[in-house]
Amino acid sequence: MLRISVALAAALAILPTAIGQAPIWGQFKITIRHFRSATDNYELNDPAYAAKLKNNSVFGQITPRSVFTFENGDAIVALAKKNGQLLRAGCISYDEVPNWVNSAEIPGSALMNNVVNHCSTLIKHYADAWDIVNEPFTDDGFTRPLGFSISSSISYIDTLLLAARAADPSAKLYLSSSGIDTPGPKLESMISQVQYYKDHGIPIDGVGLRSHFVSGEVPSLANLTANYERLTTLGVEIAITALDIRTSATPSGAPILQQQTDYKTVISACKAVAGCVGVTLSDISDKYSLIPGICAGFGRALPWDTNFLPKPAYDGIIAGFKN
């Protein structure tokens, strides 16, 4: 599955005060460079969705979720270039590899060669920034194996990072993970590995946080800021590479207002840390959210409703940028 993001080629990116109004560029001094959304090819067939996504005063970057073909990926690239947006993509994620990767019949060396060729080809064809490996660690903090025949040694990540730098020396190279917004085994493993890469000259430019929160359980502003700073003090930038804050499937009243507060908290935390350079929504609208399908009983995780109308969560994002 190929993931690409698109970001405005501007030093600072800010949301407008409301959809359809002029952007409020430059009214606030902020460190966040990009505000983005993930997307998929089939969603572009929805005129209302496509119109929202093309609004580059709101979304400086978009990330496609599609089964990889150059044709499908190129459609997202064309949309991004038309709207003056940069590209971000993902290379490897353990849960999004084809079945043959897990075949016992493929020697480790052959699989590694195929994976390196896959990533190198993508990097040469697409994008300005890459999540080279998504979810490199288990919940216990161990390095995930890649396929059947490559062990859980970190060497395959080293190899991919080196190959990615060779493929495009100007691309930003990230590792991206969920579960690192708060202290725990995943965060400690990420910190340890990034420090290892820095000490041994292995290229790493940033860490992506895949922030799939439950409303009412988002860490405090102080705790988020402290964890973000633990990563940036390693000499890398960070970005929230997938943000959604899910609520009950039919929320109203207090849960909706809590979600608004939660979005404000996350944006404010990124804005407070100089090395936090961007935020990517997991998508724009609840109409296409993946949350109901993977988190039973939950939904309404995104800032626009199924009719593409801004929810209070959107106001929370605006408040976070202004904060």
Image: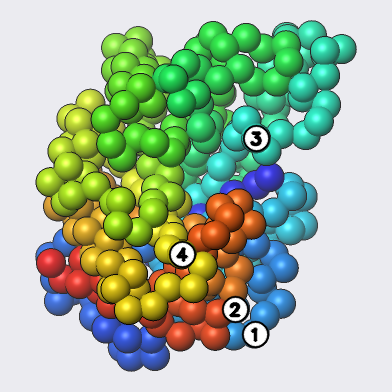
Which x, y percent locates residue 256?
34, 73
Residue 67 position (above or below residue 264): above
Left/right of residue 231 with respect to residue 105 in the rendered view? left
State the mark number for residue 95.
3
Q: Position of residue 22 (x, y in %)?
A: 31, 88
Q: Amino acid at mark 3?
A: Asp
162 displayed left or right of 118: left
Q: Residue at x 23, y 52 (%)?
A: 270
Identify the disc placed on residue 50: 2
Tell me the residue that label 4 is attached to. 248
Dot placed on the residue nearer the N-terminal end, 2 or 4: 2
Element type at mark 4: strand
The answer to whether any part of residue 4 appears in the image is no
Q: Confirm or deny contact between disc 1 and disc 4 (CB under 8 A).
A: no
Which residue is most to the bottom? Answer: 21
- C-beta proximity under 8 Å, tags 2 and 1: yes
Is 278 located above or below residue 106 in the figure?
below
- Which badge, 1 or 3, is on the more N-terminal residue? 1
User: What amino acid does circle 2 point to?
Assistant: Ala
* The quadrant where residue 33 appears: bottom left
* Marks 2/3: CA–CA distance: 28 Å
Q: Quadrant of residue 306?
A: bottom right
For label 1, the SS is helix
Callout 4 amino acid: Ser
Residue 9 horizontal/vertical position (percent): 38, 62
Q: The C terminus is located in which quarter? A: bottom left
Tell me whether circle 2 and circle 3 mark residues in contact (CB < 8 Å): no
Question: Secondary structure beneath disc 3?
Answer: helix
The tag earlier along the polypeptide, 2 or 3, is 2
Q: Residues within 10 Å of mark 2 (few under 14, many from 20)?
A: some
Q: Which residue is mark 1?
A: 47
